[in-house]
Amino acid sequence: MTTDEDTASAAHPRFAAALRELGLDVEIRRFPDETRTALQAAEAIGCEAAEIVKSLIFAADGEPVLVLMDGASRVDVERVRQELGAAKVTRADAKAVREATGYAIGGVPPFGHRTRTRVIADRGVLDHTVVWAAAGTPHTVFATDPKTLIDHAGATLADVRETSD
């Protein structure tokens, strides 16, 4: 447990404000080295890569969409396109990610973004008791249960991970 002051000093200010607004009290962990990738974060935390939740921005017919995916899996863009009923879905570039969320790639949290975006969470995120996600910077993470994370992100559950057929 941290105080608002502790959270504000560790998390990105926009994310700390979102936590306060949502009434969430989570511990923010700060690491001296970047945890931009799921593997880096898992190693720093001491958990499995699948317990990391990646917050990935895509462009669906030009509109930003946030996909929450466990750190051991990859997003199947075609499944995202079908889920959204979009003509085209592509990975957003760094500029589009920052414009939509207010955060840099590697630090995008699941909520507390600059703009409201549609959110899809892969069902696999629910396979864990606790998951870890970015807290607004490449150096910070927080833990919560997956249902709380999905609810606060306003996500729709879907099967959008790549499968090995």
Image (cartoon, rainbow, N blue to C red):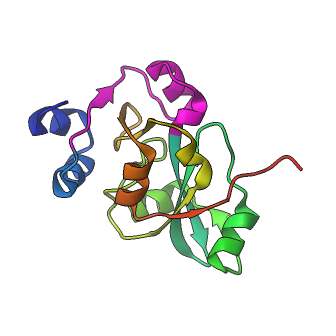
Q: Position of residue 104 (x, y in %)?
A: 42, 48
Image side of residue 87 versus residue 1, left or right: right
Toward which corner of the image does residue 89 lie, by quadrant? bottom right
Q: Position of residue 52 (x, y in %)?
A: 51, 36
Q: Position of residue 131 (x, y in %)?
A: 46, 37
Does the image show residue 37? no
For the point 23% across and 54% down, the residue is 18
Toward which corner of the image does residue 113 lie, by quadrant? bottom left
Q: Position of residue 121 (x, y in %)?
A: 54, 57
Image side of residue 144 versus residue 156, left or right: left
Image side of residue 18 versus residue 117, left or right: left
Q: Is residue 85 above or below residue 135?
A: below
Image side of residue 24 versus residue 142, left or right: left
For the point 69% across and 47% down, the residue is 74
Magenta stretch holds residue 113? no
For the point 52% across and 54% down, the residue is 94
Which quarter of the image is occupied by the N terminus?
top left
Does the image show residue 151? yes
Magenta stretch holds residue 50? yes
For the point 42% across and 21% down, the residue is 33
Give the residues drawn in magenta, as a range: 25-52
Q: What count of labels does the image hold?
A: 0
